[in-house]
Amino acid sequence: MSFAMLSTPSFPALKIREREPRNEGRAATKTRILAATEKLFIVHGFDATSLRAITTEAGVNLAAVNYHFGSKEELFALVLTNRLDTLNLERVRLLDALEAKGFDAVNTVEQLIATMFLPALRLARNAERGGEDFLKFLGRAYADPATFVRDLLQERYAAQNARFVQAFARALPELATQDLSMRLHFMLDAISSTLASEDARKLMTGLAATSNSAVDEDAAVLAHLAPFLAGSLRAKVNQSSQQEAIRAVLAFA
């Protein structure tokens, strides 16, 4: 797979019929529609968020949505990529810097996990680029079962995802490609659900409560999160003793 597109801050073009507002009134309308869509998406997801619900939340009519964005899919594509393009570009920037410096010989996997999640923590503190609901948004985006959302994320961020898969593969050479892909999939799904959970975010806040700075706060969260996830990626599975223990349970089914 080619990674040429990573040399510039761009992603595959999307067919979004977004129109430039001609005056402040239209700009405000467009902003309300985007904010309403994001808010409802976080709570309900793509399939359960109708254009009628969006127009009601934004206080506009359906014609305004059609004028500025075209369709529901085009509107959601813009909402998703506005947030996630920034996240993925920052992830790749950190990965590039880490590869240039050189990984920790023992804790490469932990560093890669931190590289994936550190940008999300920082964006959640930046009101202009992410905001306090960013982690909720991120969790919903990657946990949403809608085919449209999954296809969009897979296609648009394929190159970035491949970069990380290859980095993990080098750090975990003992894992077969299929095993690594499955574990990364499980890991990301679990974290997506965690980020979407209010209780989990409260626990993360508790971990960071004694921190003296944003850097210390991120370190406190990642120092608990990264080793736990790294252990799941390194775990030995399908051992004969494990098979026997599991079959003993199956015998009662």
Image (spheres, rainbow, N blue to C red):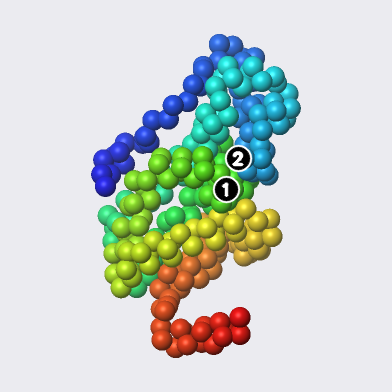
Residue 124, image x, y percentages: 57, 47
Q: Which mark is residue 126?
A: none
| Horizontal side, residue 89 vs residue 138: left or right | left
From the image, tell me which residue sits under label 1: 144
Residue at position x 67%, y 43% in the image: 44
In which image quadrant can residue 234 be found? bottom left
Rendered view: 93 above or below 105:
above
* Picture coordinates of residue 217, whole percent (x, y): 56, 59
Query: What kind of residue is marked 2?
Result: Phe
At 29% from the left and 69% from the top, the residue drawn is: 173
Given the current orientation, which residue lies at the most extreme top position?
22
Q: Which mark is residue 46?
A: 2
Above or below: residue 14 compared with residue 149: above
Taking 108 as reference, is 83 left or right? right
Specify which label sits upstream in the sequence, 1 or 2: 2
Q: Position of residue 215 (x, y in %)?
A: 51, 56
Q: Is residue 125 visible?
A: no
- Tell me if mark 1 has few (under 14), some (14-19) or many (20+) residues whose alpha carbon lies within 10 angstroms of its own: many
Is residue 243 or residue 52 the one in the foreground?
Answer: 243
